[in-house]
Amino acid sequence: MKLPFLFSFFNPDLRRQARENAKAGKSLDLLSDFVFKALLTANDEDSKTALRCLLSACIHRPVESLSIRNSELLPEYLTGKTIRLDIHLVFNDGEQADIEIQVKKTEDDIKVRAMVYAAYLLSSQAKQGKYYKTISRVYQIFFLNFVLFPESDKIPRRYTMREEDEHDELSEVVKVIFYELPKLKRIADKYFSGEITLKDLPADQKWGIYFRYRNDKRMAGLVEELCREDGIMQAERMLKKISRTEEQWARALFREKAAMDYRSEMYASREAGKEEVEAKYKPILEENARAIEENARAIGEKDRVIDEKDRENQELRRKLREAGIE
């Protein structure tokens, strides 16, 4: 158990709230990364069925068997970056997938991150004496609770490696898939207006709607119908199980509190930092401004003297020419 998590057990207020929430069966937030992982990686038949159905929906292919692997990919050299995946899977005949959930947009480049993760899944299969043609396909799948590609309403967005002009695919060995969950609002609206039914939706969009709107009371009717679908039904049962676990609620409340404390500290630091920076650099800026002004005056005086001497020399040369002296 990680040390930061232990603090939540020693906080009596958090423990009491966790106990009350678990007893009441209050639903955990599916968009939390640790809830997402707990839901889909538990040693429970409902969890295993939900994960298999989710993966099958995302890759548009049947998943007969799968196993969850170590989520930490260690670098091959000392200064390399350690990669921690949310849900690392090996399925069917050695194919691999990583399923990630990202709640908030950060300053980092998630598109590059997806490519790096996929590259790690590929390179982990390259062993000495093994032909490259034996390397199995890998899928990097991201569920995003924000819009990454605002220029399009398409969901999901699927990427492979293709020729720049003629667009022929180089290989099927890598596929990167992004689900931008906010874009599902348009589809949900069509459902409530009667334009579409659940039968009109592909399975992966149904999963996206479930993740996005599970705890949204306005979408209760849609979520209730989704929970009759195979896979989502098991996910819903699993969510209810972990939502009755005091330990999971303690984790959730601790993370929420830690995030709030972090934001408060960052805001306070920025405000204090502004004053500190201003106190440190404003006098320097003012001194530099004075120096620039003084130098400008000095340069102006120097230019005036040079111009005056130049005119004096021109007058002397003119007098010499008049005297016949070159």
Image: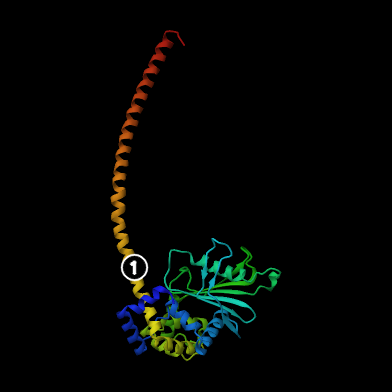
Foreground residue among 326 and 279 = 279
Foreground residue among 267 and 137 = 267
**Image check: 262 left or right of 123?**
left
Q: Give the image location of residue 151, x and y in percent.
A: 47, 68
Q: Quadrant of residue 30?
A: bottom left
Residue 202 in view, yes or no: no
**Image check: 263 left or right of 156?**
left
The residue sitting at 42% across, 90% down in the picture is: 224
Residue 255, compared with residue 302, is above or below; it is below
Task: Give the residue number, with chain letter if any, for mark 1.
Answer: 263
Number of numbered discs visible in the structure rendering: 1
Foreground residue among 108 and 229 = 108
Q: Give the image location of residue 190, x and y in percent.
A: 43, 82
Residue 81, compared with residue 1, is above or below; it is above
Q: Give the image location of residue 35, x and y in percent.
A: 43, 80
- State which quarter of the image contains the N terminus: bottom left
Residue 241, compared with residue 107, is above or below; it is below
Q: Give the image location of residue 34, x and y in percent.
A: 44, 78
Disc 1: CA contacts within 10 A as few (<14), some (14-19) or many (>=20): few
The residue sitting at 39% across, 76% down in the picture is: 5
Residue 249 in view, yes or no: yes
What sort of colour scheme is used for the picture?
A: rainbow
The residue sitting at 42% across, 8% down in the picture is: 323
**Image check: 105 left or right of 230?**
left
Going by the numbered disc 1, the residue's amino acid type is: Arg
Secondary structure of the residue carrying tag 1 is helix
Foreground residue among 182 and 231 = 231
- Residue farthest to the top, as pictured: 323
